Each structure stands twice: as structure tokens, then as C-alpha cells.
Image (cartoon, rainbow, N blue to C red):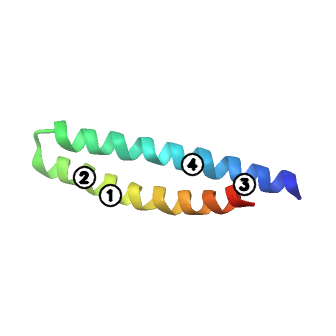
Amino acid sequence: MSDDKMNTRDCLQRAWMNTMELVRDFEMYSKRIEDEKVADVFKKFAEEQGMQASSLREMYNKYEQN
């Protein structure tokens, strides 16, 4: 059972880190792209990924506490 917990923790950590990287990438794209419509899409993606990253971090923290 502890192997499952460890795997879950590791997956959550990796997913959180990957999602945070997407947030940074999308935010950077939104600031560099001149096409306002495309920039707005990347800004929206950054915000959505940020919410997902927050949820992943909360779940990860619960596993860290145990």
C-alpha cells in the first residue's frame, strides 16, 4: 500500500511541476505574440493551467503531510 502512496505522490509532484512549466510558457507566449487574439488564448491557457496547478499542489501537499 505504501508503494501506491509513493507512486501517487510522485505522479502528483511531476504533474504539478509540468503544469507550472506550462503556465510559465503560456504566459510568456501571451506577452510575446503580437496577434492579440492568439495572445489572449495563451493568457487564458496560462490561467487555466494555473488553476490546475493549484489543485495538483493541494493534493500533493496532502500526501506530503502523511
Residue 58 in the image: above or below residue 42: below
Tag 2: Cα neighbours inside 10 Å, few (<14), some, or many (≥20)?
A: many
The residue indicated by pointer 4 is 15
Say which residue appears at 18% left-offset and 41% top-offset.
31
Give the label on residue 43, or none: 2
Name the outermost residue toward the front.
65
Q: Earlier in the sequence, mark 4 or mark 2?
A: 4
Lower position in the chain sequence, tag 2 or tag 3:
3
State yes or no: discs 1 and 2 in contact (Cβ < 8 Å): yes
Label 1 SS:
helix
Q: Residues within 10 Å of mark 1 (few under 14, many from 20)?
A: some
In three-dimensional space, the C-alpha distance between marks 2 and 3, rounded to whole angstroms, equals 30 Å
- The residue indicated by pointer 3 is 8
User: In this view of the protein, which residue sits in the foreground, 37 or 1?
Assistant: 1
Kind of residue at disc 3: Thr
Quarter holding the N terminus is bottom right
What is the CA distance from the residue labelled 4 to the residue labelled 2? 20 Å
The residues bearing labels 1 and 3 have C-alpha atoms spaced at a distance of: 25 Å
**Residue extending furthest toward the right:** 1
- Distance, label 4 to label 3, CA atoms, is 10 Å
- Along the polypeptide, which appears first: circle 4 or circle 3? 3
Residue 57 lies left or right of residue 66; in this view the side is left
Residue type for callout 1: Glu
Report the Cα–Cα distance between label 1 and label 4: 16 Å
Q: CA distance from mark 1 to mark 2?
A: 6 Å
For residue 58, above or below residue 9 = below
The amino acid beneath tag 4 is Ala
**Figure quadrant of residue 32:** top left
Mark 1 highlights which residue? 47
Secondary structure found at label 2: helix
| Image point (66%, 49%), residue name | 11
